[in-house]
Amino acid sequence: QVQLVESGGGLVQPGGSLRLSCIVSGRIFSSYAMAWYRQAPGKQRELVARVTSSGSSSYVDSVKGRFTISRDNANDTLYLQMNSLKSEDTAVYYCNAPIAGNKWMWSWGQGTQVTVSS
């Protein structure tokens, strides 16, 4: 069974930076496109950044130019570098493998809380 373990969240001031990590167990990481999702209180979970198995990335408009998704296939790890953070980025962040129909491949991990506040 694949397990997703997210880490790296925390409390940061507006304009600050954080780097999130997601380790994927099962030695299957390199075969899948991966994505970071986030869920703010009272809102639906949204996909914010996606990277193909070969490294091509895409972003939701609200994070373009501020967030960078990357992957280390040798270590089964997904990253999200978040710069110029805003209060509206406050959410629990999760990783997963996106599939057709706006769905995802695996059960969710515990996520990592990002709070942007002064």
Image (cartoon, rainbow, N blue to C red):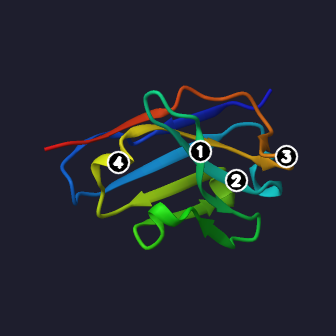
Residue at 29% across, 63% down: 84
Foreground label between 2 and 3: 3
Which quadrant, please, contains the C terminus? top left
Residues at discs 2 and 4 in contact (Cβ within 8 Å):
no
Of helix, strand and loop, which one carries label 3?
Answer: loop
Q: Quadrant of residue 52?
A: bottom right
Q: Dot 2 surroundings within 10 Å: few (below 14), some, or many (20 or more)?
A: many
Q: Dot 1 surroundings within 10 Å: few (below 14), some, or many (20 or more)?
A: some
Q: Position of residue 14 (x, y in %)?
A: 21, 54
**Residue position for label 2:** 34
Residue at 29% across, 54% down: 86
Type of the residue with mark 1: Glu
Label disc, if present, on residue 101 of the rendered structure: 3
Q: Judge whether 22 appears above or below 52 on screen.
A: above
**Residue position for label 4:** 88
Type of the residue with mark 2: Met
Residue at 75% across, 50% down: 29
Of helix, strand and loop, which one carries label 1?
Answer: strand
Name the outermost residue toward the left.
118
- Measure how far apart labels 2 and 1 are at the Cα level: 14 Å
